[in-house]
Each structure stands twice: as structure tokens, then as C-alpha cells.
């Protein structure tokens, strides 16, 4: 019902602002735990993609009932907001391109994020071995530019350590390093 206008001191009518609507948050009822869990998950997903395990851990840290968490996450999986396979593919692409990680390191990264072993294997299966070797060549070429003037053994050792930390197999590492050292102008025989 609208508020009737009132008169000012000079006798003119002035509008009285309507009463503010009732705030639903000020309701005396207990908030629904499913709504709270859903809000937590959606907030997490707006910041960055997450695995189901990461979201479960976040809900547990916030004191959410595991049964409520499971129900909310199941529903969000059904609508496609939580998808570990798509998340794993995204991580593989971004980490392989950005950091130059190889299959072994990518697998460790995915498992650390709580991705199921079967999903990890499926995501890693899509990596082309030749692409992985090309990425190792790029990393070695970039690192080799910063090691100009060092002995070939020192360069080899440092390059092998770098590739090992990024998860490359020893066979790929040694092949790529041997090629790079042999092609380096400073190690060419005159």
C-alpha cells in the first residue's frame, strides 16, 4: 500500500519515501545448508576452475555436512559446472604450454588436485609424444641461450636437471640435449 503524501511546512505536498522492502536475509529462519554450500561452491568456481575434490575440501573446511556437500556437488556435476575431465584437459593444456611440463609432472599435478587416476590417464593419453619432444627442444634452446660460455658438461648437467624437474623422461631429455649441444655454435669444431 503506497504511503500517502504529507504536507511540508509551507503547505506544499511532499512525497514520503516508501518503506524499504523487508530484507530476506533478516529472516529469523535457519538458512538452508544446501544454499550455503551451493554459494560457497559457486564463489570458488567464479575465481577459477576447480576439481570436485578441491571443492569437497573447501566445503569441509567451511564446516559443511559431507552429505550436503555431496548432494550439491552431484547436482553441479549434472549441470556441467563441476567436470573433472574438462578440468584435467584444461590443466594439461595450460601447464604444458605455459610451464612446459611433461606427462609425468602433469600427472602428479592432476593427482595433487584430486583428479581420479582414470581421468588423469585419459587426459595424458591425448598428449602427442612428438609435441612433448618439441616442447623439450624449445625449453633446452631457451635455457642454452643463458648458459653461453659454460663447458658442455656443465650445460648438459643443468639442462638435464631442468628437464627432469619438468617431468621429461631421461630418453627424451638426453636425445634433445645431445642435439642441442651438438648444434650449439660454441661447441662446433672449426
Image: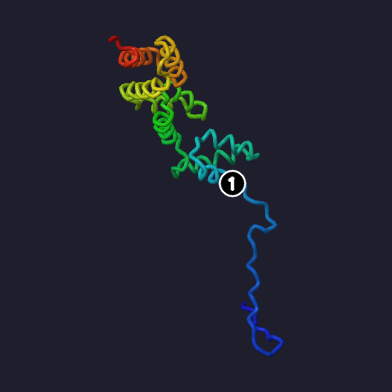
- Indicate left or right for 145 with 27 as reference: left
Answer with the quarter of the image where residue 147 lies: top left
Q: Residue at x 51, y 45 (%)?
A: 46
Q: Quadrant of the C terminus?
A: top left
* Location of residue 29 (image quadrant): bottom right
Residue lying at 39% horizontally and 11% vertically, measured from the top left:
152
Say which quarter of the image contains residue 121.
top left
Residue 126 picture location, percent across and down: 34, 27
Q: Secondary structure at mark 1?
A: helix
The residue closer to the viewer here, 95 or 113, is: 95
Say above or below: 52 vs 148.
Answer: below
Residue positioned most to the right:
9
Mark 1 highlights which residue?
34
Residue placed farthest to the front in the image? Answer: 190
Give percent across and percent down for residue 72.
Answer: 54, 43
Nearer the observer, 38 or 153: 153
Given the current orientation, which residue lies at the most extreme left position? 190
How many neighbours does mark 1 have within 10 angstroms: few (below 14), some (14-19), or many (20 or more)? Answer: some
Q: How is the image coloured?
A: rainbow
Q: Position of residue 66 (x, y in %)?
A: 60, 37
Quarter of the image where the N terminus is located:
bottom right
Most foreground residue, 97 or 3: 97
**What is the x, y in percent for residue 60?**
62, 36
Q: Residue at x 37, y 12 (%)?
A: 174
Say whether residue 157 is left or right of residue 3. Answer: left
Classify residue 69 as left or right of residue 84.
Answer: right
Residue drawn 42% across and 25% down? 101
Number of numbered callouts drawn = 1
Amino acid at each position: 500500500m503506497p504511503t500517502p503524501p504529507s504536507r511540508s511546512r509551507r503547505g506544499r505536498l511532499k512525497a514520503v519515501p516508501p518503506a524499504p522492502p523487508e530484507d530476506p536475509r533478516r529472516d529469523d529462519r535457519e538458512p538452508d545448508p544446501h544454499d550455503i554450500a551451493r554459494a560457497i561452491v559457486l564463489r570458488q568456481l567464479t575465481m577459477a576452475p576447480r576439481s570436485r575434490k578441491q571443492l569437497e575440501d573447501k566445503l569441509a573446511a567451511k564446516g559443511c555436512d559431507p552429505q550436503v556437500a555431496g548432494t550439491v556437488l552431484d547436482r553441479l556435476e549434472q549441470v556441467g559446472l563441476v567436470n573433472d575431465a574438462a578440468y584435467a584437459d584444461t590443466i594439461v593444456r595450460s601447464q604444458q604450454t605455459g610451464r612446459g611440463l611433461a606427462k609425468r609432472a602433469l600427472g602428479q599435478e592432476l593427482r595433487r588436485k584430486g583428479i581420479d587416476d582414470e581421468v588423469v590417464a585419459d587426459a595424458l593419453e591425448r598428449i602427442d609424444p612428438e609435441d612433448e619432444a618439441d616442447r623439450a627442444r624449445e625449453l633446452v634452446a631457451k635455457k642454452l641461450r643463458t648458459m653461453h660460455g659454460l663447458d658442455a658438461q656443465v650445460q648438459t648437467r643443468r639442462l638435464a636437471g631442468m628437464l627432469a624437474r619438468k617431468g621429461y623422461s631421461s630418453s627424451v631429455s638426453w636425445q634433445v640435449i645431445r642435439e642441442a649441444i651438438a648444434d650449439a655454435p660454441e661447441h662446433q669444431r672449426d
